[in-house]
Amino acid sequence: MSKVVLITGGSSGIGKAIGEFLIKKGFDVYGTSRNPSNYKESKFPLVALDVTQSQSIINCIDEVLSRTSKIDVLINNAGAGITGPIEEIPEDEIKRNFETNLFGPINVIKAVLPSMRKNKSGLIINITSIAGYMGLPYRGVYSASKGALEIITESFRMELKPFNIEMTNVAPGDFATNIAAGRYHAPVIDNSPYKEQYEASLKMMDEHVDGGNDPNEMAEAILKIINTPKPKIHYKVGVFMQKFSIVLKRILPDKVYEKLLMNHYKL
């Protein structure tokens, strides 16, 4: 039987690219979307899911299991971007981002674990971000939510060892997707002390995404992980300098690394 793969956030961007790639490799792929009816041309079935709603998560997992009786691989890809000076981002938007990027994936994992434990096997891949390895200016909330998912995966892995369930993180750098359009942008306020720096940083972020790598690079990396019996804890996928920035953070003094980031963002 083909392995069953469930990809949250499978209607566009990285999730869509992964799903279409895995179908060609013979996997039985299901994706999710908050509004599947908007994506009638999807090459794989989309199931309704809002990762911020507990009942929606339960309904989604139940529906996939009713169609397939198992979920071999869960790819927690659904996520949301957020930008802005931390001082000026509304508290509700900060909470909403953590609901999507951290609590949502945790709750999807919780919902799928009983089935995987019953089958005595399973693989969970959490899509995080290279931004989750460092606090970036005007992306601090995003960095924090993705960084938290990286760390909680480390704990989850050890707890799941007795059940033959593997879990790993894949941190992408910038890829050419529509993520920028779906971000929450704190408004640029005319009399804000952050106005000039924030505007310049926003422009740079959008340029990085527009000039990003092909999402199929992520799909190929995911396939390799699925075919790896004992995946590593952390994977990074992106251009050399983005991946190398994590190495630099590990070896440089904190203030030196901070200065490098500030120079990069022209702060």
Image (cartoon, grey):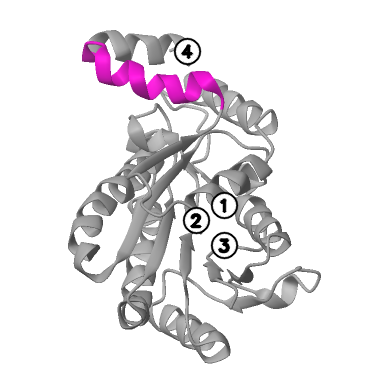
Q: Tell me the amino acid under the disc marked 2.
A: Ile
Q: Which residue is mark 3?
A: 9
Task: Please indicate whether residue 188 sits to the left or right of residue 167 in the image.
Answer: right
Identify the residue at horizontal 63%, vertical 67% (top origin).
27
Residue 223 in percent (x, y) is at: 57, 52
First of labels 1, 3 by sequence position: 3
Tell me if label 4 and label 3 are in contact, CB under 8 Å.
Answer: no
What is the quadrant of the C terminus in the image? top left
Other residues around mark 3 within 10 Å, as few (<14) / some (14–19) / many (≥20): many
Residue 144 in percent (x, y) is at: 32, 42
Span shown in magenta: 239-254
Give the alpha-carbon distance from disc 1 to disc 2, as whole Å.
5 Å
Residue toward you, 16 or 262: 16
Numbered tag placed on residue 223 in the rendering:
1
- Is residue 22 in sight in this rendering? yes
Q: Which residue is mark 4?
A: 264
Tell me if label 4 and label 1 are in contact, CB under 8 Å.
Answer: no
User: Circle 3 sits in a helix, a strand or a loop, which is it?
Assistant: loop
Task: Please indicate whether residue 127 sits to the left or right of residue 208 in the image.
Answer: left
Residue toward you, 216 or 11: 216
Q: Which residue is mark 2?
A: 226
